[in-house]
Image (cartoon, helix red, strand yellow):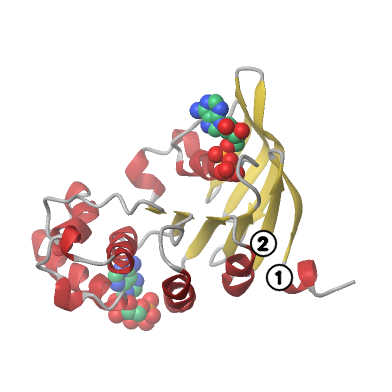
Amino acid sequence: AKFVEFIDVEKNYGNFHAVRRLNLSIGRGEFLTFLGPSGSGKTTTLNMLAGFERPSQGVITLDGKSVDRLPPYERNIGMVFQNYALFPHMSVADNVAFPLSVRKAPKAEIGPRVIRALEMVKLERFKDRKPTQLSGGQQQRVALARALVFQPTLVLMDEPLGALDKKLREHMQIELKQIHEMLGVTIVYVTHDQSEALTMSDRVAIFESGNIAQIGTPDALYNEP
Ligand code: ADP
Ligand code: ADP
């Protein structure tokens, strides 16, 4: 089986079908983007993979095991959201250390791993600041470091660059792609920005009304007749 499998997955809210009969396989190390208009089911699909929401029907497996049955910390999934969700009262370093602390990582390991993660996003010199003393782009890089610090096998990103201006967004797209290549981590990325999807992704899944209308490499989707 592939690293991630969605098998006939549905999500209903009352009579409303947010996700319909979705089938999808994701390979280890892949950068897959969910592209589509608002309300097409991208976030719902991502949240089911994260284990935040349960499918109404069907199964999602991670490494052959049903996501439902994995305790949260065994899912080993990093998350990045549009609104950073940093702890404002904690320093940058403490924010990044948080996932290691809750996983009870040995104290001696935490410091060096936090520094490595901050180096990766080029923020080691800001480690003692509070998030409010950073720009939006820097805050999002802290959120990225926090999502990567426990060496997740899968990182889910929901419109992570949505709050940034165009120039910064383009810069961060390049950084994200570099981090993906360096770590070889699997990334599932949600956006409604087509150029963003095409720049970064190995494959793009185009969502329409709760299902995947098309899926393929950027080349196959946009350059072939
Ligand atoms: P997208 O991420 O593509 O914008 P979502 O997955 O957030 O789409 O939402 C898909 C549809 O499901 C939308 O019409 C949304 O209003 C609906 N929806 C999402 N969450 C809920 C909920 N908790 N209760 C009712 N409807 C919801
Ligand atoms: P290496 O080739 O040194 O085993 P990688 O090429 O996977 O490591 O990563 C490059 C650098 O990033 C290394 O210094 C590694 O320790 C660090 N690194 C890898 N994964 C993570 C992570 N999830 N969080 C923080 N640092 C990481």
Q: Position of residue 121 (x, y in %)?
A: 31, 74
Quarter where residue 143 is shown = bottom left
> Does 184 sit above or below residue 81?
below
Sequence-first tag of 2 and 1? 2
In this picture, residue 118 sits left or right of residue 84? left
Disc 1: CA contacts within 10 A as few (<14), some (14-19) or many (>=20): many
Residue occupied by mark 1: 218
Residue at 26%, 71% (x, y): give it: 117
Q: What residue is disc 2 on?
A: 204
Q: Looking at the image, do the residues carrying marks 2 and 1 touch, with CB atoms under 8 Å apart?
A: yes
Residue at disc 2, secondary structure: strand
- Place residue 221 in its image quadrant: bottom right
Task: Report the amino acid beneath label 2.
Answer: Val
State the image coordinates of residue 130 (x, y, percent, origin top left): 13, 60
Beta carbon at label 1 within 8 Å of ligand 1: no
Based on the displayed image, in which of its 4 quarters is residue 175 positioned? bottom left
Q: Is residue 125 visible?
A: yes
Task: Choose between 59 and 122: the one closer to the eye.
Answer: 122
Q: Is residue 75 left or right of residue 28?
A: left
Is the CB of mark 2 within 8 Å of ligand 1? no
Query: How many residues crowd around disc 2 within 10 Å: few (fewer than 14), some, or many (20 or more)?
Result: many
Counting from the top left corner in percent of width and height, residue 87 is at: 19, 50
Residue 156: numbered disc: none
- Hey, what amino acid is under mark 1? Pro
**What secondary structure is marked by label 1?**
helix
Task: Give the image quadrant in which the ligand numbered 1 is located.
Answer: top right
Q: Nearer the viewer, residue 78 or 87?
A: 87
**Figure check: 96 above or below 23:** below
Q: Is residue 23 left or right of residue 38?
A: right
Q: Is residue 95 above or below residue 108?
A: above
Q: Position of residue 53 (x, y in %)?
A: 48, 32
